[in-house]
Image (cartoon, coloured by chain):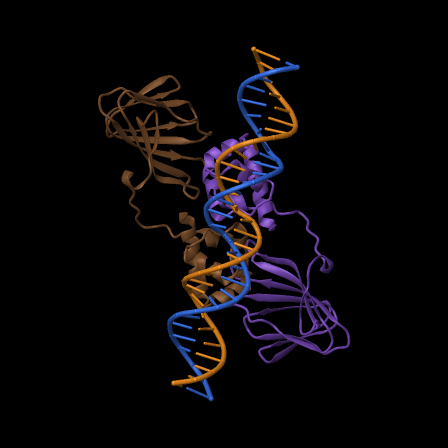
Chain colours: A purple, B brown, C blue, D orange
Amino acid sequence: MHPINISISKNVLRIRKDRKLSLDQVAELSGVSKAMLGQIERGETNPTITTLWKIANGLRISFSSLIKEESALVTIMSKESVVALTEDEGKYRVYPLFPFDPKKQFEMYAMEIDPQCCHESEPHHEGVEEYISVTEGTLELLIEQELFIVNPGSTIHFQAEKPHAYRNSGESTVKCMLTVHYPG
Amino acid sequence: MHPINISISKNVLRIRKDRKLSLDQVAELSGVSKAMLGQIERGETNPTITTLWKIANGLRISFSSLIKEESALVTIMSKESVVALTEDEGKYRVYPLFPFDPKKQFEMYAMEIDPQCCHESEPHHEGVEEYISVTEGTLELLIEQELFIVNPGSTIHFQAEKPHAYRNSGESTVKCMLTVHYPG
DNA sequence: TCTTGTTGTATGTTATAATGCACATATGTA
DNA sequence: TACATATGTGCATTATAACATACAACAAGA
């Protein structure tokens, strides 16, 4: 079950309760069966756009008020809690801590590069920027043939639409935080 | 097929073409099969929220940019082009010309009331307002026991959360335009 | 207590969203 | 021409959204 349906679930339930409506009444207003409404409120189903549209119209509310989620005050993520994406035979590992959020326009990864590994990054769109904070080891960053050395404690910022590669020429694994920002 | 899917269809196609991506590439980015993407772009299907979410994330765009529609410059609606809602044994007819639009917060109906018909309106929420322009016949409007006479060419405006009824005591059918406005 | 009605949930069926694969149509290359 | 690669569409299958109906839990009266 996709997280967005949890948000929708909460929103529909909250609005219905605020207005002191029964499932039958909302079914009458929206033209969606109360069985379906119940499943949506319980987060047991994955509604179609049309169904959600009917609900928004029936309740006289905007589409976005159904899909918005209350921002969690605190969220703690760790490498252990996510599934790593590996490349270069496991020598290059990326942990998506905070995947792309359309509202915030960025995503955050933990990144690990084993010794003697060089990883060419996927090309990005125009306006995309990266921020890399190195926590352990020394990262070598090649941006358009030019080499940049990033030591632990330092953060580098660059335009990611240019071809670039991450390299670890050292003896120990490089660990860093990668933030990717997308233009509005 | 619900109109909103036409908007989604156009948006996905436009964004994909702008970025010069193939269906295969978008499928790779979003995790949605290219067959489904093709159907969505052709407006042949009614996608689920989760599918749309995957597309928005894959393309790194907001949810709302998928559902927004370019406002048509001109739209002509008539009673003949919509399905009437009838009550009071067909003596009271409502034609939803412009159904509720969450963005605009109002809806517009054509309304016809045959002679000797009195129709009690559904109760509305707080803050809802009605505007009624009479084009033919004389409308009698009862708002909280009080009687208002509306002649052709006149428009009446009132708070629709108060109990109200439409009445035609004349000889000919009353025809009017009804606009309902909902609070933001 | 026995209705009577109102609420939300559970079930079986139908409609259809979503997929995977095969196909057709280019477009370029040897 | 023959071959290869990439693109969008058509089709059969599977998964599941949506519905109609029946059911269970609870409440308010009579």
Residue B81: image location, x then y, percent: 30, 42
- State the count of labels: 0
Residue B112: image location, x then y, percent: 29, 30
The image shows residue A178, relative to residue B76, as above or below, that is below
Quadrant in which residue A143 is drawn: bottom right
Quadrant in which residue A130 is drawn: bottom right
Residue A27: image location, x then y, percent: 49, 35
> Would residue B69 be found to the left or right of residue A153 on screen?
left
Quadrant in which residue B105 is drawn: top left
Residue at screen point 34% across, 50% down: B72
Residue at screen point 40% across, 19% down: B144
Q: Is residue A135 visible?
A: yes
> Would residue A48 be found to the left or right of residue B100 on screen?
right
Which of the two residues, B134 or B114, is positioned nearer the viewer here? B114
> Would residue B171 be found to the left or right of residue C17 on screen?
left
Which of the two residues, B153 or C2, is positioned nearer the viewer here? C2
Residue at screen point 47% across, 33% down: A28
